[in-house]
Image: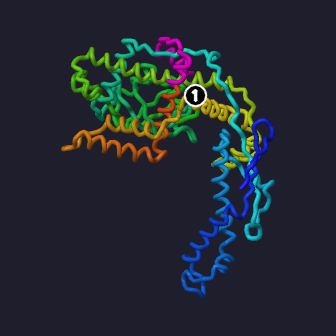
Amino acid sequence: MNITREKIGDLELSIKIDVAENDYAERVAKQLKTYKQKVTVPGFRKGMAPMGLIERMYKPSIVAEEVQNLLSESLYKYLEDEKLDIIGSPLSNEEKTGDVDFAKSKDYTFYFDAALVPEFNIQWDKVSTTLNQIKITPKEAEKQVEDITKRFGDFQTPEEVGEKDFVYGKAVELDKNGAVKEGGLSTFTSFDISTIKDDENRALFLGKKTEEKVVFNAAKAFTAADIEKNFHLEAAAAKKFKADVEFTISGCSRVVPHEVNEELFAKVFPGQAIKDAAAFKKAVTKEMEKSYNEQCQILFVNEVRKALIDQFDAKLPEKFLKRWILSRSNEKDLTAEKLDAEWEEKYIPSLKWEFVDGALNKISPIEPTQNEIVDHIKGIIRENDKPVEGEDEKAKEDRLERAARSIASDRRNIHQVIDRLSGDKTFALFKEKLNPEVVKISIKEFGEKVK
């Protein structure tokens, strides 16, 4: 077998593979012997058909199969031996290869197209960004404590609607005469009474019971965003919706907040032995900062990635890339014409992102290993694990390990874990290379930056 390559342009390659009969003859002979022993040919006992007959019946298909296997093995070994960093995988060039007759020919020549990954040298000194950290105010911590007491509160279904209740029922649009508008809005919905923005409309609901009706003006009662959400309208339609609405109450629910006591502390922070409200508020503040700072890390990573993508100016092998994407795409409606139309806006940024990731992986692997994935999953399981009676520590670890490896074995289950670990490793790499200035900001300022 002989493999040669020819460079076409800056990045594209044409790979030629010559396959001679002696390259595959031994493989084919072995397969024919197996077929002779296993197949049943009419007129002959099993395993007794003449080899000549077996060859006439099966040899062309066996040759085709073994040559293809040999091609695949040899091509990827060649790429590895030659240390060629290629994009995706080679594509068969059927035009240059031509028709292959495995029944008549003995020697074959195949052509493949490939493209090299464009070189990209990261210029860290040209990346300028800061690492934000959130400072939680006492007022924000108090609001979070209030939300927690509601989350762990007692759920009730009162007979009459109160000021902080959640009400649900059917809303229908009325015309200018107060009658149900033909073809108008008609939907089942629910909302929090406290989200009604004016006292007059809010008072209409208070004290009402199941099956009672309330007529109110939607635009006076709700913001456009709430109209969009509550009445299931498009944003543009919600802004224009000024009609009166008749709302028939189906019921309401109420949450009586949990008392701020040791029982609540244990539910929210099990195992931390928090004894008083001050310590609880401190723990809540710490948890909020941790959560927000994880979001700050994501923002930092995205900002650096954008800067690196903006740096990327290497020429791309577009002809090959378009062929490769079309050959691998799962989109049934993706055509060459559609690909061309979306190339600059959709595909180029995505490809640059992948090439930047490739450059980062050469500096420090950012793709998590299987063991790292398993360890992360095991940590999640451990946090929620319940003790098994009679189980010692070793048995517990073995059980957690088996469970984690079982979950990690199916990649469909662990996309979020992979993204999380990749993000953490990318953040660590960026922080090491850039040593960014840490800037304390408020939740509001962070929200503006995210926008």
Front-lying residue, 26 or 339? 26
Task: State the quadrant of the C terminus.
Answer: top right
Task: State the quadrant of the N terminus.
Answer: bottom right
Q: How many marks?
A: 1
Question: Residue 331: percent from the left, percent from the top?
Answer: 65, 47
Q: Does the magenta segment cover residue 105?
A: no
Q: Residue at x 73, y 37 (%)?
A: 343
Left or right: residue 103 compared with residue 134: right
**Crowding near pointer 1: few (<14 within 10 Å), some, many (20+)?**
few
- Which amino acid type corresponds to the residue marked 1 in the rendered image? Ile
Residue 239, by quadrant, is top right
Question: Residue 210: percent from the left, percent from the top?
Answer: 35, 37
Q: Does the magenta segment cover residue 435?
A: yes
Q: How is the image coloured?
A: rainbow
Question: Residue 142: percent from the left, percent from the top?
Answer: 34, 16
In this rendering, the answer to whether 288 lies above or below 387 is above
Left or right: residue 17 compared with residue 125: right
In this rendering, the answer to whether 38 lies above or below 197 is below
Residue 158: in sight, yes or no? no
In this figure, which residue is indicated by the disc labeled 1? 363
Residue 419: in sight, yes or no? yes
Left or right: residue 223 compared with residue 285: right
Q: Residue at x 27, y 41 (%)?
A: 396
Segment colored magenta: 427-451
Q: Residue at x 43, y 44 (%)?
A: 408
